[in-house]
Image (cartoon, rainbow, N blue to C red):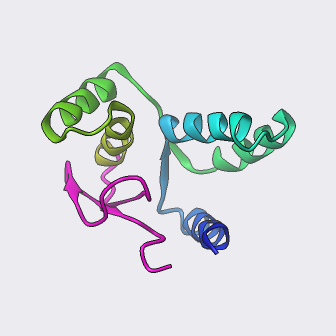
Amino acid sequence: MKQRRAIELITSLRASGESVLSTQVLQEYTNVALRKLRLPPALIRERLAFYRRFDVVPASAELIAGALDLHVLHSLSFYDALIVQAAAVSACQRLLSEDMQHGVVLAGVQIENPFKQI
């Protein structure tokens, strides 16, 4: 059920053009795909080609410094702070994550667990 919901969300968000991905999200996806899911690199590359069609927020020294501030202020893991900071600098109103606390607002971005009602 989660997988179907995730695919629906990704597809609709891509079609709407209203979404961004951070390089941190792409790195985490690739790591999980390799280590946990054991997907072949060719399939991972194919999926990354799809994700390249989103606006991608690259990591920069400025983004990392902002993430460090979020890490300190809100006791977030540094890697989650990178994702939140990427959303904030992209003027996102919400960030979809099942790993962060649903409903919390960080750096002006509301965290939303897309699976909360499943």
57, 112: nearer the viewer: 112
Task: Report the side of 98 relative to 16 (left or right).
Answer: left
Residue at the far front: name it: 36
Q: Residue 45: x percent and y percent?
A: 78, 38
Q: Residue at x 24, y 30 (%)?
A: 66
Task: Report the side of 14 relative to 91 (left or right).
Answer: right
Q: Residue at x 80, y 41 (%)?
A: 39
Q: Quadrant of residue 94?
A: bottom left
Q: Quadrant of residue 62?
A: top left
Q: Judge whether 101 appears above or below 74 on screen.
A: below
Q: Quadrant of the N terminus?
A: bottom right
Q: Residue 61: x percent and y percent?
A: 34, 19
Counting every numbered tag in the picture gives 0
Task: Report the side of 94 relative to 74 (left or right).
Answer: right
Q: Where does the magenta region start and end?
A: 90-118
Prevailing secondary structure class for the magenta stretch in the rendered image: loop
Q: Residue 74: x percent and y percent?
A: 17, 41
Residue 115 magenta-drawn?
A: yes
Q: Judge whether 86 appears above or below 17 on screen.
A: above
Q: Residue 33: x percent and y percent?
A: 70, 41
Q: Residue at x 24, y 27 (%)?
A: 68
Residue 40 magenta-drawn?
A: no
